[in-house]
Structures are given as structure tokens and as C-alpha cells.
Image (spheres, helix red, strand yellow):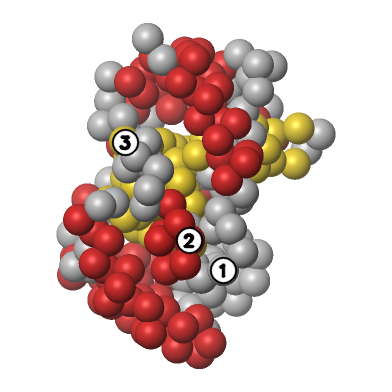
Amino acid sequence: MRLCVPSYQFPGTWLSNIEKLAGLSWIEGIELLFFSFDADARELFSAERDRVAAFSERFFFSLHLPDPLSPADVDLVGMTASFVDLYVLHPYGGKGETREIGDWVPMGETLRSDYGADRFALEYTGRETFEMSHALLPEIGLCADTGCLIREGLSPVDWILEHEAFVREIHLHAARGGKDHFPLSESDIWVLELARRAAQSDWIVNLETFSLEDTLGSRDMLRRQLP
């Protein structure tokens, strides 16, 4: 298990967050969050890119690709391929999708061909879109989002074990009242079995909450469950 946190724990940019997190020895990796790669994001990240890359000696990096996936995102992969280990993409058909799936599939295949098939993982963000996209890219790695699984009435542990051979990253957080990205608590009893499995794996376990206070809460809860 490799423990990772999102690049947004404090208000600020990718670099400012990374600089603040570098002193926390328990954090092994950073998930670089990109919800878009428009002109503003490109300009800001271009200015920070080399200094972010320099932290690859301290952290491993995964990268959350924008949804929907666009041709600009191919540039983002090219800019980061020298220091990012894993790219997580959403299934086709998410919010804001306007292209035909006939455009989405070749883009995914091209990225995997050009940068390495084992460096991409398809995130579970909903049953229908995931199953359709996974059927079209059946050999791609997988990213399990525990909050989304819980909201759909599924057991995160059962789903992860069913797809264990392909799981590369787990977005670990709780769901309450139909919403997710909550820190883990004692009521999340499923974490016990997941922690045991994760401790014996090379999965990236990403404590995907968006404040350091919440992330520390999840870290402490997970640590209590580890064998």
C-alpha cells in the first residue's frame, strides 16, 4: 500500500500545497487534481510544472485527468509523463460530455499506446457509465471510488476484491446521506477488511478529502485498522 493525498489540502495551487505537505513524512504520494485544463489552468501549471516535477524525489504522483477527456488533456499527459506514475480518467458519458464515444475510445487507446498501458486507470464513478466504458477498454487498470460505491449501495470491499487483479488506485473516503468525500469514521466498519487487504498490496490508497483536517481524520482511522 502506498498512501497518497490530493493536491488540494489548503487553498492554493498545486505547488503551494505540495510544498506544505512535503514535511509530513507519512504522505508518500500526491494526486494532482485537474478538473479542467483550459487556458488558465495550462498557464498556471506551466509556470509551476518544473518545481512540481522536482518533488518526484520526495513523492510519487498520480494525476486526475479532467472530465470530460479532451484533446488538450493529451498535452497534459505529455507535460507530466516524466514524473507521474498513474493517470486516472473518468468513464465516457460523465457530466458535460458532448463528444461521441467513437472519439473517446481512440483517445484512451492512444494515450495508453504512447505512454504505457499500465499507467492509466478507469475510475468507478457510476455503474452505467463505468460498465459501458470498461467494456470498450477491458484491459485498463481500475480506480475504485469508495464513496461512489457506497452511494450506489455496493460494498467497496466486495467490488475491489472482484476486480482485484486490475485495481491500481483506491479513492478512500466515506459517504453520508447521498454525498461523499467525508473523512472515515468508526461507523465505516468496512474499512477494517479493506485495510487488511490494502496492507498486503501495492495499491495507491488516496485519502480523497479536501482539507488536511479531514485527511488526517481518515489517516488516523485507517491506521487504527491496519494489522
| Residue at 46 percent of width and 21 percent of height | 223
Q: Which residue is mark 3?
A: 2
Q: Which residue is mark 1?
A: 12
Q: Quadrant of the C terminus?
A: top left
Q: Earlier in the sequence, mark 1 or mark 2?
A: 1
Kind of residue indicated by mark 2: Asn
Between residue 131 and residue 28, name the one nearer to us.
Answer: 28
The disc labelled 3 sits on which kind of residue?
Arg
Please indicate, yes or no, whether residue 136 appears anywhere in the rendered image: no
Discs 1, 2 touching: Cβ within 8 Å: yes
Q: Nearer the viewer, mark 1 or mark 3?
A: 1
The first of marks 3 and 2 along the sequence is 3
Q: Which mark is residue 92?
A: none
Mark 1 falls on what kind of element? Answer: loop
Q: Earlier in the sequence, mark 1 or mark 3?
A: 3
> So how many labels did they put on this image?
3
